[in-house]
Amino acid sequence: MDHDWLRPVTVDDIELIEFYIAKAKYEESNHNVVNMVLWLDFFKLYQWHNDDIMIIICEFKDITYAYMPLCSKEHFIEGVSIIKKIFRDLDKRPVFNCYLKEYVEMIQHIDDDIEFSRYNDIDDYVYETEKLRTFSGKRLQKKRNNLNVFYREYLDVYKYETLTVDNVEDCRDYLDDWRDNLCDEFLSHEAVGIERVFNNWHRLPVSGGLIRINNCVRAFIVGSSLSDRMGQINIEKADESIRGLYQAILKEYLQENMLNKNYLNREDDMGKENLRQAKRSYHPSFMIEKHIGKGKI
């Protein structure tokens, strides 16, 4: 991107981005440094920052848009003004993506040049953490049945381990198996991003777990903190041919992690019907609504 202010985001910016994310305290899955690293080759990111504000601009195919300014609330409107100036310099119509309702209302209170609309495909699914830790209640009966089948059939041959720098390499063979069967552009890029997360495990604010069956990794999960009350699941992969394995990796992970989080953000469904059905089947506690705004050139 040809702009004097902006420079590409790289993995060397992890700590810097974390600093500004901590100021913003957004409960939205895209404003998460692990998510950014995961999709860095697919969604090209650029950043500018001063002492108070970081601006993240994204290029995706032929679309250029801005995330919410990474800053405290008191600097948010200033951040929006900076975004508009950047787009003027680029001679592009400003586009604002993944904006939360509260912040949309802040903008609309003082700026009628930006028109916002809801975009359901990028809403985040949020669940009560304890329910996914226990799979209790009638609504999760089918998931609990799957889990019980897994434990009954694999009790003597499965092992859960905390994901660390010492065993993260063991997930690569399973990742390679999973990648061999991909024909979806998003998932192919996700596989590349997962490799990037593994390569930078020691630098990222992540936790994770894996399940081995007969000593072979057949599932792994990666999560991170989104806010004081909410965690985020960034990656969930499991052998779909093993009934209950997806439920097992989630349950086992939550036994050791997210213990102080009331809610768990499992991200959006990308508008994919199979993902939408899967996420709805866990009965979210609520959705995080997101908006897209377009301003004047």
Image (cartoon, rainbow, N blue to C red):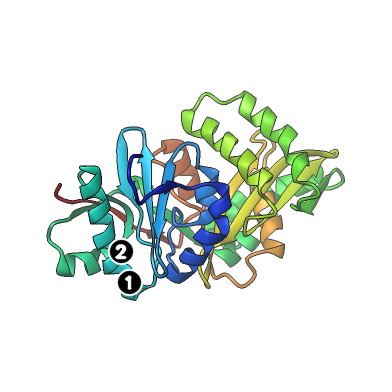
- Which class describes the residues within 10 Å of circle 1: few (<14), some (14-19), or many (20+)? some
Q: Which residue is mark 2?
A: 79
Q: How many marks?
A: 2
The amino acid marked with disc number 1 is: His
The amino acid marked with disc number 2 is: Gly
- Which class describes the residues within 10 Å of circle 2: few (<14), some (14-19), or many (20+)? many
Q: Which residue is mark 1?
A: 75
Residue 57 is left or right of residue 180, and the answer is left
Residue 133 is left or right of residue 168, and the answer is left
Seen at 43% across and 40% down, the residue is: 43
Residue sitting nearer the eye, 16 or 29: 16
Task: Verify CB contact (< 8 Å) between mark 1 and mark 2.
Answer: yes
Residue 53, horizontal then vertical, whole percent: 38, 65
Seen at 78% across and 40% down, the residue is: 170
In this rendering, is residue 191 above or below 128? above
Residue sitting nearer the eye, 50 or 56: 50
Residue 155, horizontal then vertical, whole percent: 83, 48
Residue sitting nearer the eye, 51 or 285: 51
In this rendering, is residue 217 above or below 6? above
Residue 159 is left or right of residue 178, and the answer is right
Residue 264, horizontal then vertical, whole percent: 53, 61
Residue 220, horizontal then vertical, whole percent: 69, 45
